[in-house]
Each structure stands twice: as structure tokens, then as C-alpha cells.
Image (cartoon, rainbow, N blue to C red):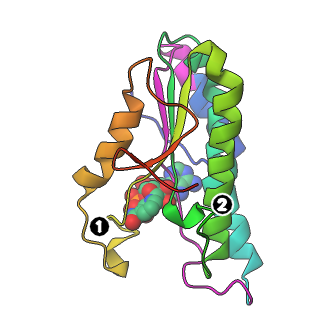
Amino acid sequence: MALTLDVADPQSIAAAAEHVRAGTGRLDVLVNNAGIGSDFGVAGVDPDFEAIQRALDTNFFGAYRVTIALLGFLRKSAHPRIVNVSSGMGGVAEMGGWSPGYRVSKAALNAMTRILSTELKDEGFLVNSACPGFVNTDMGGPMGATKSVQDGAAGIVWLATLADDGPTGGFFRDGEPAVF
Ligand SMILES: NC(=O)c1ccc[n+]([C@@H]2O[C@H](COP(=O)([O-])OP(=O)(O)OC[C@H]3O[C@@H](n4cnc5c(N)ncnc54)[C@H](OP(=O)(O)O)[C@@H]3O)[C@@H](O)[C@H]2O)c1
């Protein structure tokens, strides 16, 4: 089943959840991949607050709202998995300058990973963040990324299909720990 979803629009999320309810009523894997780079290269000392808001609306609130809207269906799965597609640019420990909206939105997404993984651990959920690396997509291509989409997706598919004894609450790139 494929459906239209604008993660920045709560009404669209509610409609998508209704489609799932009317369909299988169960979800095994949620990959929060939708993301925008609304302020790449913009200086933190000269911020575009509207662009920061747009980044948060899609990259953080979008993923969070979708997750909560679909949580009941994931709870019906015997092996629920959530993968939040984040970015090394959201790692707080090695946070650099520029692109404040994108960076903060991905840092917040990583925090959401930690919060939900903790609260849902006893229910068998595995919730992790993944950085795909610098991938040649519509986002990365114009900036010179050469990593293939297949290679970027591999680490996400790995987290989406973890065995029950797999990690939760982690941040990974290409199957290896990344810096939160
Ligand atoms: N490419 C990289 O080097 C790189 C590095 C680190 C992290 N990431 C992350 O990887 C993820 C995928 O990015 P990408 O490289 O594939 O970028 P992309 O080529 O620009 O694709 C972004 C995807 O997000 C969707 N999207 C954007 N806003 C949305 C919304 N409001 N509702 C639903 N879907 C929405 C787009 O759908 P439409 O096409 O329909 O608009 C598109 O499918 C993002 O979260 C990004 O931050 C990418």
C-alpha cells in the first residue's frame, strides 16, 4: 500500500494513519526518512528563523508526529522497529558551525530516538538513528556527494531489520556507531 503523506501537515499525518488503520492495522517498521535542508550554509550568527522553523517542522516535528500517530500500529507488531534518518550534522558532541536549522532539527531527532527508545524498550521496540553518509541524492548531489543511494540505504535497512537482540537508542552510520 502506498499513500501520500506530508509530514509537516498534521492533517495529512492523521489521514495516513487512518489509511493504515483501514488497511493492515499493523506496522512492523517505521523509517522516518523525510527531511529538508532549508538553511544549508546559512551562518548561525545570521540565522533565517523561518528556514529554521521549516527544518524543525519537517525533520523533527514531522518525524515525531508521524511516530506518535503510528505508534499503536507498531505496538501490534511482534518486532517493532523505528529508524530515524538523521545526520552527522546533528551530532552535538562534534557540532560545527553553519546550517543551524538543519543541525538543530537533527539533534532534536536524535534526542527523540533516545527518549522513545528508553520508554519503549520493555515493549520490544528497537529505536535508532541512522546517518546515511554523504549521499548522491537530490539533497547531497548538488553539494558533491558521491556515495550511492544503495550504499546510503544499507545502514538504514540494517536497522529496520534488526534481530530482537539488536541495539536500541543508538546512532549509526554504515552499521557502525556514530557520535551523538
Ligand atoms: N543526502 C545526504 O548526503 C544526507 C546526509 C545525511 C542525512 N541525510 C538525510 O537523509 C534523508 C533523505 O534525504 P535525501 O538525501 O534522500 O534527500 P532528498 O533527495 O532531498 O529527499 C528528501 C525526501 O524527503 C521527502 N520530504 C521532504 N519534505 C517532506 C514532507 N514534508 N513530507 C513528506 N516527505 C517529505 C521528499 O519528498 P518529495 O520529493 O516528495 O518532496 C524526498 O523524498 C533526510 O532526512 C536527510 O536529512 C541525507
Quick one: SS at disc 1?
Answer: loop
Is 28 part of what is drawn in magenta? yes
x, y percent for residue 138: 36, 68
Left or right position of 167 against 174? right
x, y percent for residue 90: 59, 62
Left or right position of 156 against 170? left
Residue type (three-letter) at the residue carrying disc 2: Ser
Q: Residue furthest bottom?
A: 46
- Seen at 65% across and 63% down, the residue is 92
x, y percent for residue 137: 33, 65
Q: Above or below — where is 3 with respect to 104?
A: above
Counting other residues with Cα less than 10 Å from the Cα at mark 2, is it few (<14), some (14-19), or many (20 or more)? many
Stretch in magenta: 19-45
Q: Nearer the viewer, residue 6 or 69?
A: 69
Residue 145 visible in the snapshot = yes
- Residue to which mark 2 is pinned: 105
Along the polypeptide, which appears first: circle 2 or circle 1? 2
Residue 136: give its label: 1
Pointer 2 with pointer 1, Cβ within 8 A: no
Quadrant location of the C terminus in the rendered image: bottom right
x, y percent for residue 136: 29, 67
Classify mark 2 as within 8 Å of ligand 1 or not, answering yes or no: no
